[in-house]
């Protein structure tokens, strides 16, 4: 059974997907602690509803970013957390936090990185006129949404798409790839070598094209 910690800042729908996966017996992990940096995050309600321990750790209560991150790392380590999942956590973590959990901090980002990193990834994709976007689960390093990729899900962009409609389409896949990734870690199948991540025993090789090809 893998001990996980989840960091959140808002709605917490990805946290919910992990909770559901655990409750349905599809994820062999337990959530030892949820940390929110936002006292008003709806994610906290989800913790209360499912009896999951949570702590609110606000940046403004600490003299420095390092002190804030040390507090979070200590809380997670006290709970013997082995994997830290960023699920809509809106802050960039520095080396001082990451060194406590080498290659064991993951994040979900709503684009196919390295495209559309940073904030409003779905809006960026719509405005760019991309024909595909999607979501990525990656190992967190000190870059912003740039660490080694574990899994990506591709969704098409339609001519009539708005930021909202695309976000919704991507979110459905976020709620699949993130729990799946946690389970891959629980099974000990994720191997990280530099930038390359291999999920042992996984099937690779799907090819999407958009618009669909006709004569070719
Ligand atoms: C998701 O779109 C995630 O990819 C991004 O922030 C959003 C969080 O949503 N990092 P939620 O709080 O999990 O509902």
Image (cartoon, rainbow, N blue to C red):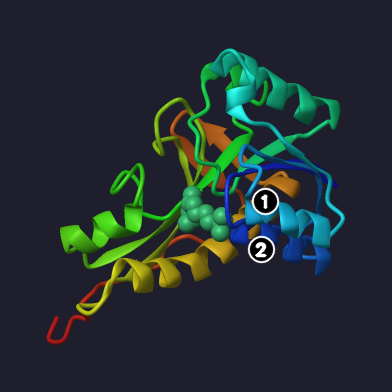
Query: Which residue shows up at 56% across the image and 14% down it?
Result: 64
Relative depth, front residue between 9 and 27: 9
Q: Secondary structure at mark 1?
A: helix
First in sequence: mark 2 vs mark 1: 2
Query: Which residue shows up at 33% across the image and 43% down it?
Result: 117
**How many badges with numbers are in the image?**
2
Q: Quadrant of residue 114?
A: top left
Q: Quadrant of the C terminus?
A: bottom left
Q: Is residue 197 visible?
A: yes
Give yes or no for contact between labels 2 and 1 (Cβ–Cβ under 8 Å). no
Query: Which residue shows up at 63% across the image and 31% down it?
Result: 58
State left or right for residue 160 relative to residue 187: left
Q: Quadrant of residue 124?
A: bottom left
Relative depth, front residue between 18 and 151: 18
Q: Secondary structure at mark 2?
A: helix
State left or right for residue 108 relative to residue 186: left
Residue 176: give x, y in percent of width and height: 58, 65
Q: Is residue 202 visible?
A: no
Q: Is mark 1 within 8 Å of ligand 1?
A: no
Q: CA distance from mark 2 to mark 1?
A: 11 Å
Q: Quadrant of residue 75?
A: top right
- Say above or below: 125 vs 197: below
Residue beneath label 1, please?
A: 182
Residue 13: give x, y in percent of width and height: 61, 61
Relative depth, front residue between 56 and 73: 56
Q: Is mark 2 within 8 Å of ligand 1?
A: yes
Residue 39: give x, y in percent of width and height: 66, 43
- Say above or below: 198 vs 59: below
Residue beneath label 2, please?
A: 17
Within 10 angstroms of label 2, few (less than 14), some, or many (20 or more) residues?
some
Query: Which residue shows up at 62% across the image and 37% down it?
Result: 37
């Amino acid at each position: 059974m893998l001990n996980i910690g989840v960091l959140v800042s808002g709605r917490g729908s990805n946290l919910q997907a992990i909770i559901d996966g655990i409750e349905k017996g599809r994820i062999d992990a337990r959530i030892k602690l949820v940390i929110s940096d936002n006292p008003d995050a709806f994610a906290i309600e989800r913790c209360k509803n499912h009896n999951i321990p949570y702590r609110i750790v606000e940046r403004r209560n600490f003299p420095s970013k390092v002190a804030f991150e040390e507090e979070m790392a200590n809380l997670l380590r006290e709970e013997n957390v082995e994997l830290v999942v960023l699920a809509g956590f809106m802050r960039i973590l520095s080396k001082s936090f990451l060194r406590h959990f080498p290659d064991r901090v993951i994040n979900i980002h709503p684009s196919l990185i390295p495209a559309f990193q940073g904030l409003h990834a779905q809006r960026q994709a719509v405005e760019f006129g991309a024909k595909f976007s999607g979501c990525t689960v990656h190992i967190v390093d000190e870059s912003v949404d740039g660490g080694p990729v574990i899994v990506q899900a591709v969704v098409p962009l339609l001519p009539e798409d708005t930021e909202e409609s695309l976000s919704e389409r991507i979110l459905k896949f976020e709620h699949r790839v993130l729990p799946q990734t946690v389970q891959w870690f629980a099974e000990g199948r994720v191997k990280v070598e530099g930038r390359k991540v291999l999920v042992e025993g996984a099937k690779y090789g799907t090819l999407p094209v958009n618009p669909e090809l006709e004569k070719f």
